Image (tube, rainbow, N blue to C red):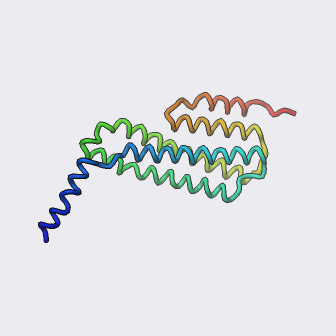
Amino acid sequence: SPQADVHATAPVLVAALVWPPDPVRELRHRLERLRQQLAADFAEIASSLAAGGGVSSAQLEDVRAHSREAVRDVFELAPARRALRLSPLRRPDRPVVIELEDRINLAARLYRHARSIARDVADLAVQSGTLAAATRHLADAADRALNGLDPRPPLERAAAALATPPAG
C-alpha cells in the first residue's frame, strides 16, 4: 500500500539526513590507495631499471590497471560533491573535499606519466643505476605531493642525479 511505502521510506530519509555518507573518509581512502599503488609501481620501475631487462608485461599491465582505477576515481568525485550539497551536516567538509579532489586529480595525472615511463622501460630494457635513482626520487616527489607536502626537494635530487655524468 502507498501508506506502507511512505512508512518504509521515512526511516531511510531520516537516516540519510542524520548519518549522511562521509565523502571525506571515502576520498581519503581512495587517495591513500592511489598513493600506495603509485609508490609500488614506481618502485617496480626503479628496480627494473637497476637490474636491467625492462618492465615485464605483467608489471606493465598492473601500471595500466592502476592508471585506469585512478581515472575512475576522478569520475567518482562528483558523488562526493553531491553528498556535500545534499547534507547540511557535511557542508563544513567542503574545503577538505576540494583539497582531496585536487590530490586525486594529481594522482591520475601522475599515473599517466608512470604508465609512459613503464612503457619506455619495457620497450628499451635498459639498465641504469642513474635512471633508477632518478625514478626513486620521482616516486618520493609523487608521494610527497599526494600527502600535501612540497615535492621540490626530491625533484631537485632527481634533476641532479640526471645531470651527473655517468662514471667510467
Is residue 108 in sight in this rendering?
Answer: no
Q: Position of residue 46 (x, y in %)?
A: 70, 44
Q: Quadrant of residue 163?
A: top right
Q: Is residue 127 left or right of residue 25?
A: right
State the count of labels.
0
Q: Is residue 101 left or right of residue 137?
A: left
Q: Position of residue 7 (x, y in %)?
A: 15, 62
Viewer-proximal residue among 25 and 135: 25
The residue under the point 57% across, 48% down is: 37
Which residue is situated farthest in the right direction here?
168
Above or below, comparing residue 42 to residue 69 in the picture: above
The residue under the point 72% across, 34% down is: 162
Q: Position of residue 83 (x, y in %)?
A: 31, 48
The residue under the point 42% across, 52% down is: 75
Position of the N terminus, as image quadrant, is bottom left
Above or below, comparing residue 86 to residue 158 in the picture: below
Is residue 50 in sight in this rendering?
Answer: yes
Above or below, comparing residue 38 to residue 163 in the picture: below
Which residue is situated farthest in the left direction here?
3
The residue under the point 55% across, 52% down is: 67
Viewer-proximal residue among 84 and 105: 84
Q: Position of residue 134 (x, y in %)?
A: 69, 37
